Amino acid sequence: MTRTNKNHTLSESENIMNKTELEKNLKTDYLGKPLIYTDCVDSTNNEIKRLAQKGYPTGTTVIAEKQTSGKGRLGRVWNSPVGTGLWFSFLLRPHTDFSQISGITLAAGLGVCRAVRSFTGLDAEIKWPNDIIIGNKKICGILVETAAETDKLKYAVVGIGINVNTRVFPDEIKEKATSLIIENKYSAINRTKLFKEILFHTEKCIDDYLKNPVIPNDYKQLCATLGRNISVRRGKNVINGIASDISENGDLIATDENHNKILINSGEVTVQGIY
Ligand code: BTN
């Protein structure tokens, strides 16, 4: 017997994705329209780039059950096994200049964080710029790739990977990765419904940012990096400081040991108590 409630099923076998269900009652204006669902792809980001070259519109979304070459930030591999996670990317063609890409990236993170919180009730937070964490472990990573012409953004690919019903992680990441099912006392999460909730919140956050390009207070409130000791590598040096704020264009603001203000706009930030 399978007992179900609104958002959680106790049987993962019921939770197989298909295109019809993924598109049903999708409450977005453009994200997921069109939606391409596939069993297996090298990387959904790569597939969106191929579709972008063919002229597909803003909002085009590719979701895969499995990626053979899932990509993480900073050239890392993203573990994307079949059936347990949400691995998807969407295409954006915003009429903005390149400087707004950090804000769009942060807006996508905020959208995922809000969706996870509202759908699961779990205390998801953001590790700047857009890892989604629960406690001190990562449940989601976002990889944004862009194509630009002079200072104009031609298109952006937003790739989102969420560990949903993953029970076991490879040794290399098990110390810092977790999944929604683990955090949800091993009650499985309906990936299809979660996906639609994410598209809905993410579209709203991106639209809000494009209408009014400021970093929302909600982002700052959900950002677990703020107020913590951080360290970041700059060439051969490691800079230590306390993260205090996010700048207008999405940089992390910190104060170093000599009370100097430092702006961090890239690279891997280590946050004390997180990772
Ligand atoms: C990170 O390193 O934190 C970013 C991980 C992004 C992974 C997602 S999974 C869907 C999309 N396709 C990819 O190849 N990468 C992104």
Image (cartoon, grey):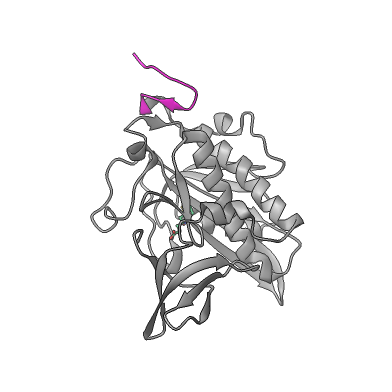
Residue lying at the far top of the rendered structure: 1
Q: Nearer the viewer, residue 221 or 88?
A: 221
Residue drawn at the location 36% of the way across and 37% of the way down: 181
Q: Tell me if residue 170 comes above or below residue 18 in the rendering.
A: below
Residue lying at the far left of the rendered structure: 171
Residue drawn at the location 74% of the way across and 57% of the way down: 212
* Residue 86 coordinates in the image, percent (x, y): 46, 43
Q: Tell me if residue 188 comes above or below residue 147 in the rendering.
A: above
Tell me, yes or no, whether the highlighted magenta stretch contains residue 8: yes
Q: Nearer the viewer, residue 65 or 218?
A: 218
Q: Dominant secondary structure of the magenta stretch?
A: loop
Q: Tell me if residue 125 comes above or below residue 18 in the rendering.
A: below
Query: Quarter of the image holding residue 122?
Result: top left
Q: Nearer the viewer, residue 262 or 90?
A: 262
Can residue 57 be seen?
no
Which span of residues is magenta-colored?
1-12
Tell me, yes or no, whether the highlighted magenta stretch contains residue 9: yes
- Which quadrant does the C terminus fall into? bottom left
Residue drawn at the location 67% of the way across and 42% of the way down: 33
Residue drawn at the location 42% of the way across and 56% of the way down: 70
* Residue 250 coordinates in the image, percent (x, y): 60, 66
In this image, 228 relative to 210: left or right? left
